[in-house]
Image (spheres, rainbow, N blue to C red):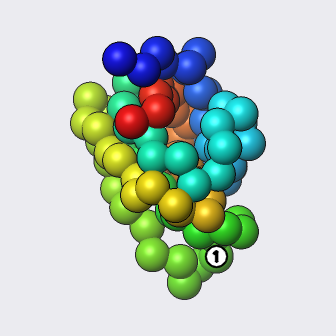
Amino acid sequence: MSQNKPPVDLGAETLTDLYSETGISAGTKVVIQVIQSREPVYFADSASEPTATTALNVCKQGEYITNDSGDAGLWAYSRSGARLTIKVA
C-alpha cells in the first residue's frame, strides 16, 4: 500500500499546484482526501494554472477524489483554506 505524503495545507483563496507541492511526478494517479475544510475544495487537472473557464471538480471534508493517470497537472483551491492527504494510487 502506498504511503501518504505529509498533509498539504491550502491557503485561503490560493491556487496550489499539488504535483509541485508534494514532489509527485506530473501524470501520476493519486487519491486525495479533504481532511479539514469548512467549505468545499475545488480541483482541476489542467497543465497550467486554472482560469475562470477551467472545469473544476468539487470535494467536501471527509470525501476522496482521484485524478486520472496521465493528467498533465493537478491544482486545488479553497476559499477558506484546507488540509489534504495525498497518496499515489
Say which quarter of the image contains residue 19: top right
The answer to whether residue 59 is left or right of residue 9 is left
The residue at the point 64 percent across, 37 percent down is 24
Residue 10, compared with residue 54, is above or below; it is: above
- Residue 4, image x, y percentages: 48, 18
The answer to whether residue 64 is left or right of residue 67 is left
Please give the count of numbered marks on the rendered protein.
1
Q: Secondary structure at mark 1?
A: loop
Say which quarter of the image contains residue 9: top right
- Residue 42, image x, y percentages: 45, 55
Q: Residue at label 1?
A: 51
- Residue 13, image x, y percentages: 64, 50
The residue at the point 45 percent across, 55 percent down is 69
The answer to whether residue 33 is left or right of residue 82 is left
Residue 50, compared with residue 61, is above or below; it is: below
Image quarter hosting the N terminus: top left
The residue at the point 71 percent across, 68 percent down is 48
The residue at the point 38 percent across, 24 percent down is 35
Residue 18, compared with residue 67, is above or below; it is: above
- Residue 58, image x, y percentages: 35, 56
Q: Residues within 10 Å of mark 1 (few under 14, many from 20)?
A: few
Image quarter hosting the C terminus: top left
Residue type beneath disc 1:
Thr
